[in-house]
Amino acid sequence: MLNTRNEYSSAQRIYEQSLKLQEGLVAKKDEMQLMGPIQILASVYWQTNQKPKAMAMYDRVTRDQPALPEHDRDAAGRHAGGAWR
Protein backbone atom coordinates (compact mmCIF):
# COMPACT_ATOMS: atom_id res chain seq x y z
CA MET A 1 0.00 0.00 0.00
CA LEU A 2 2.76 2.45 0.90
CA ASN A 3 4.67 1.94 -2.32
CA THR A 4 1.52 2.66 -4.34
CA ARG A 5 1.43 6.03 -2.57
CA ASN A 6 5.07 6.66 -3.50
CA GLU A 7 6.12 6.28 0.13
CA TYR A 8 9.02 4.03 -0.82
CA SER A 9 11.19 4.65 2.25
CA SER A 10 8.40 3.58 4.59
CA ALA A 11 7.45 0.65 2.37
CA GLN A 12 11.05 -0.52 2.17
CA ARG A 13 11.47 -0.42 5.94
CA ILE A 14 8.25 -2.37 6.49
CA TYR A 15 9.08 -4.98 3.82
CA GLU A 16 12.57 -5.45 5.29
CA GLN A 17 11.10 -5.95 8.77
CA SER A 18 8.47 -8.30 7.42
CA LEU A 19 11.06 -10.42 5.62
CA LYS A 20 13.18 -10.68 8.79
CA LEU A 21 10.14 -11.82 10.78
CA GLN A 22 9.13 -14.36 8.15
CA GLU A 23 12.69 -15.69 7.90
CA GLY A 24 12.55 -16.33 11.64
CA LEU A 25 9.31 -18.28 11.31
CA VAL A 26 10.11 -20.38 8.24
CA ALA A 27 12.26 -23.47 8.43
CA LYS A 28 15.52 -23.08 6.50
CA LYS A 29 14.61 -25.91 4.15
CA ASP A 30 11.33 -24.24 3.19
CA GLU A 31 12.79 -21.21 1.44
CA MET A 32 9.98 -21.30 -1.11
CA GLN A 33 7.62 -19.65 1.38
CA LEU A 34 9.92 -16.63 1.35
CA MET A 35 9.93 -16.17 -2.41
CA GLY A 36 7.01 -13.73 -2.45
CA PRO A 37 8.33 -11.43 0.29
CA ILE A 38 11.82 -11.52 -1.25
CA GLN A 39 10.46 -10.56 -4.66
CA ILE A 40 8.37 -7.73 -3.21
CA LEU A 41 11.40 -6.30 -1.42
CA ALA A 42 13.51 -6.72 -4.56
CA SER A 43 10.89 -4.82 -6.52
CA VAL A 44 10.96 -1.93 -4.04
CA TYR A 45 14.76 -1.85 -4.22
CA TRP A 46 14.58 -1.81 -8.03
CA GLN A 47 11.98 0.98 -8.09
CA THR A 48 14.11 3.10 -5.75
CA ASN A 49 17.22 2.63 -7.89
CA GLN A 50 18.97 0.32 -5.43
CA LYS A 51 19.91 -2.09 -8.20
CA PRO A 52 22.68 -4.02 -6.35
CA LYS A 53 20.31 -4.80 -3.46
CA ALA A 54 17.55 -5.77 -5.89
CA MET A 55 19.84 -8.07 -7.84
CA ALA A 56 21.01 -9.74 -4.62
CA MET A 57 17.38 -10.45 -3.71
CA TYR A 58 16.59 -11.80 -7.19
CA ASP A 59 19.76 -13.90 -7.08
CA ARG A 60 18.57 -15.35 -3.80
CA VAL A 61 15.33 -16.43 -5.44
CA THR A 62 17.02 -17.99 -8.46
CA ARG A 63 19.84 -19.53 -6.37
CA ASP A 64 17.33 -21.60 -4.41
CA GLN A 65 15.60 -22.94 -7.52
CA PRO A 66 17.43 -26.31 -7.69
CA ALA A 67 15.71 -27.36 -4.46
CA LEU A 68 12.28 -26.58 -5.93
CA PRO A 69 10.11 -28.84 -8.07
CA GLU A 70 10.61 -28.10 -11.77
CA HIS A 71 7.31 -26.24 -12.31
CA ASP A 72 8.11 -23.95 -9.34
CA ARG A 73 11.67 -23.33 -10.64
CA ASP A 74 10.23 -22.20 -13.95
CA ALA A 75 7.81 -19.81 -12.28
CA ALA A 76 10.48 -18.37 -9.98
CA GLY A 77 12.85 -17.87 -12.88
CA ARG A 78 10.22 -16.04 -14.91
CA HIS A 79 9.41 -13.68 -12.07
CA ALA A 80 12.93 -12.97 -10.87
CA GLY A 81 14.62 -13.13 -14.25
CA GLY A 82 12.13 -10.84 -15.89
CA ALA A 83 13.00 -8.00 -13.60
CA TRP A 84 16.65 -7.48 -14.36
CA ARG A 85 18.18 -10.11 -16.61
Image (tube, rainbow, N blue to C red):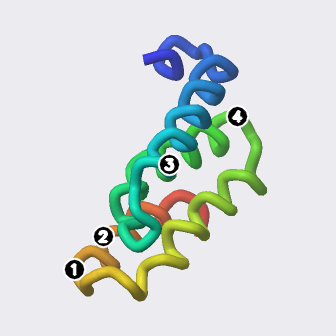
Q: Nearer the viewer, mark 1 or mark 3?
A: 3
Q: Mark 3 or mark 4: which comes first in sequence? A: 3
Q: Nearer the viewer, mark 1 or mark 4?
A: 1
Look at the image and tell me in which quarter the C terminus lies: bottom right
Residue 35 horizontal/vertical position (percent): 41, 58
Q: Mark 1 or mark 3: which comes first in sequence? A: 3
* Mark 4 element type: loop
Residue at label 3? 24
Look at label 4 and name its amino acid.
Answer: Thr
82 with respect to 53 (left or right): left
Look at label 2 and name its amino acid.
Answer: Ala
Look at label 1 and name its amino acid.
Answer: His
Please tell me how crowded label 2 is: few (under 14), some (14-19), or many (20+) other residues with Cα within 10 Å: few
> What is the CA distance from the residue labelled 2 to the residue labelled 4?
25 Å
Q: Is residue 11 among what the camera can see? A: yes
**Numbered label attached to residue 13:** none
Q: Residue at x 32, y 80 (%)?
A: 68
Q: Do callouts 3 and 4 mark residues in contact (Cβ within 8 Å)?
A: no
Residue at label 4? 48
Residue 32 horizontal/vertical position (percent): 36, 65
Look at label 3 and name its amino acid.
Answer: Gly
Residue at label 2? 75
Please tell me how crowded label 3 is: few (under 14), some (14-19), or many (20+) other residues with Cα within 10 Å: few
Q: Do callouts 2 and 4 mark residues in contact (Cβ within 8 Å)?
A: no
Q: Is residue 58 above or below residue 3?
A: below
